[in-house]
Image (cartoon, rainbow, N blue to C red):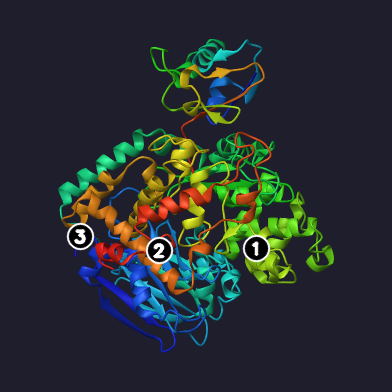
Amino acid sequence: MYGFLGKILRVNLTSGTIAEEALSESLVKKYLGGRGLGTKIYMDEVAKDTDVYSPDNKLILLTGPLTGTLATSAGRLMWITKAPLTGTIGCANSGGEFGPELKYAGFDGIIFEGKAEKPVYLYVNDGKAELRPADDLWGKTVYETTDAVVAATDPDAKVCCIGPAGENRVLYAAIMNEKHRAAGRGGIGAVMGSKNLKAVATRGTGGIKVADPKGFLEACTNARDILKANPVTGTGLGAYGTEILVNIINSSGGMPKNNWRDGAVDPDADEISGETLADKYLVRKKGCFACSMACGRVTKIKDGPYKSAGEGPEYEAAWALGSSCGIHDLAAICKVNFLCNEYGMDPITLGSTFACAMELFDKGLLTLEEMGGNLVFGNTDSIVEFALKTAKREGFGDKLAEGSYRLAESHGAPELSMSVKKQEMPAYDGRSLQGMGLEYATSNRGGCHVRGYLTSPEILGIPVKLDPLVTEGKAAILKTFQDLTAVVDSIGICLFTTFGIGLPEIANMLRTCTGWDFTDEELLAAGDRIWNLEKIYNMGQGFTKKDDTLPPRLLREPLPEGPAKGKVCELDVMLNEYYQLRGWSDQGVPTKEKLSELGL
Amino acid sequence: MIIKYFAYFRQDAGCKEESLFLAPISAIELLRKISDIHGQRLREKLLTPTQDDIHPDVIFLIDGRNIDFLQGNDSLVKEDAVVSLFPRIAGG
């Protein structure tokens, strides 16, 4: 198989055995790789009633056919399992260099099953793999673990690992790679922790064969030229990172304040913006493997109470720890973001859970005594203190580690959790960006912005300009975006490339890489298949139409100010149309005809 | 009216924001006036070379509404409006 190595590793952590298995080409053609193939393997191998922390649960790491090749921004890897936070399919992806390195070591992916008796890490080195003791790594941070594993293996090894949050089963623990890149959402790091698997290291010197080298080079060069000429991918993302969105989303009336309670226009937003980050704390930009955009931020707080250094934050993290908590000290936000990387946590859910606790306190449903601290809107020091307590599950941190839904529910007010399917929505108000509201409600992994990203047409006018305040046309473009995103996540390139290139360029790279014969439409249909597969998994976990919804606040509390003043999210109108366009019943269930059409 | 500049428009304008005391004015005419004030570098980013159209990579908001969903280049900027000018940049 071109693009693939054709081999995966199966690692049984209970018995300590490691086996090589061949990838099925027919399965790969149907589900592409990464997210699609991983979901298919997971559903075939794991019984649907399996507890997320059971040794019977599996954790799958997969790359895509373009991962590690010359394709644009082709550094992605995908982790697939059941998500502890949501109970939905859990798939989270990450950039960096680990995915390419694993392929150079000879494998497309790894299936972890069972549970190690004691902490271990896996080392994959040029076609060989071994489990090694990791007792001395348990309890160490992501940074410490990465350094120790590199020292014990190879100076050029790439390392994925969990930090204390994953060990302590924080429900939104991340799996980090190269210290700062995060497969962040849904709590997959807690699954890794439950298996006593601390880290995976890989070193490889092999290569990847492509079907049509000349055609592939031309396709990749064409895509790269388009990205370079595009103002977003050629200039903007590199200059300011994703944080640049703070001001434009806020100016458009879409950046929620104080747990989404006080409107979506923050007068102090500029203090936490990408412009301010560039002025005050940016050391340099940083790109993942084969990326010409380089949206990563290497940042440093040189002095003051939050003196620290690391990478980030991204827009959504800055919002969650910032405006959503009434906080506008960018140094403190950076510090907590660094702690999230160091301890292995998702800063979106962390910040949103803080904000939920702050509103519970405002409503008298949570006391300072119960908190054992002062986690209230605007208290900058408190987010640093409680980030550490959460990662360690110390004191009230143990409750924060459960995420906002369980916290709010345990205090009698689940409606104060700004989440969908128990995962917190990030940074874009569905009342002022109607399409984003539909996206959150229908995302297969709960509240998420990268399962369609309608901000692109609604705010940035890419690839078409759609009025954010209207509902017309949103269902149709969302379906296309969701299907395309499923393709992108499965073949191993970065979603940000789609600001510049589209389906034709992506299909050209994949065709020439794999040698597969398919039309652009057939490729998009594979995305549709993957989306439906995930939907079927979620239905098996008991999710129904009632879960395709938004917090009551977005449906019933009109925005008090800004360009969307008076608006709620008109979800019902869009949702019915969306189900029709998907070929689903009015209850959001895929029809037999639709499943047959997709070969499911 | 208040004009707010973002991203690299700030370098070209030399400020984050400014107040202009103008009678109601169309969006494109406002950009011509701003370009007259701040010079060629900003003009090249805000307007097409012939200056008869707004540069396609400009996002122009009046009180938070994109002029693409108002009256485009002819959208009216009132005396008390807040105008936000962004290059087409992105994140996510």
Q: CA distance from mark 3 to mark 1?
A: 46 Å
Residue A26 vertical placement versus A308 (above, below)? below
Please state the chain letter of the residue tagged with numbered disc 2 in the rendered image.
Answer: A
Residue beneath label 3, please?
Answer: A209
Q: Which residue is mark 1?
A: A404
Mark number for residue A78? 2
Pointer 3 or 1: first along the chain = 3
Q: Amino acid at mark 2?
A: Met
Q: Which badge, 2 or 3, is on the more N-terminal residue?
A: 2
Q: Secondary structure at mark 1?
A: helix
Report the amino acid beneath label 3: Lys
Q: Are marks 2 and 3 on the same chain?
A: yes
Q: Residue at x 64, y 50 (%)?
A: A556
Amino acid carrying mark 1 in the image: Ser
Q: Which of the 4 quarters of the picture holds residue A568?
A: top right
Closer to the eye: label 1 or 2: 1
